[in-house]
Image (cartoon, helix red, strand yellow):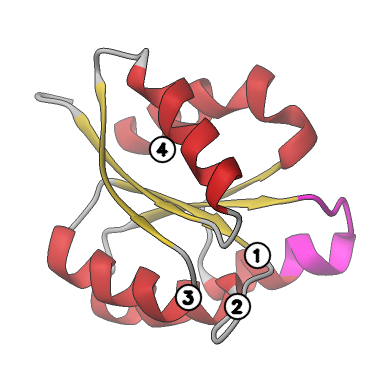
Amino acid sequence: MPGKIRVLIVDDHRLFAEALDAILASEPEIEVVGRAGNGEEAVEQALELQPDVILMDIAMPLVDGVEATKRIREHVPGACILMLTGSNSRADVARARDAGAAAYVTKDRIAAQLIEAIRELAAA
């Protein structure tokens, strides 16, 4: 993929979002183009920024990550959404996939899997 992989971070926990931003800043082929703190902001920023990959928290106020994913996929069909959650629940995985998420990573596995998952989604 030519150019940098443009990433939008969506998480209602500011410190966690900042940590993700810091992790991604160390990767020269990845550029964080924005951060959103809830699903409504995620939809607005996805439309405005047109990121390649969206890191989406599943549990957020106002509009949760599953509903935000549905809305983004309607309006930005090319968006690759990587769902982030603390849950290993099969029901959550199924809801995320049904909404249009391309991948699902639990927050405890982020250090080991996040960068590679972003690269795979951007290359798809």
Question: Which residue is tagged 2?
Answer: 64
Mark 3 lies on a secondary structure that is helix
Amino acid type at circle 2 is Asp
The quadrant of the image that shows the C terminus is: top left
Which residue is painted at 51% across and 67% down in the image?
A: 100
Residue at far front of view: 15
Mark 2 lies on a secondary structure that is loop
State how far apart marks 2 and 3 are (Cα).
Answer: 5 Å
Is the C-beta separation of discs 2 and 3 under 8 Å? yes
Which residue is painted at 84% across and 54% down in the image?
A: 87
State how far apart marks 2 and 4 are (Cα).
Answer: 22 Å
**Image: magenta residue range:** 86-94
Question: Which residue is tagged 3?
Answer: 39
The disc, 2 or 4, on the residue closer to the chain's N-terminal end is: 2
Mark 4 lies on a secondary structure that is helix
Question: Which residue is tagged 1?
Answer: 58
Residue 86 at x, y percent in the picture: 80, 50
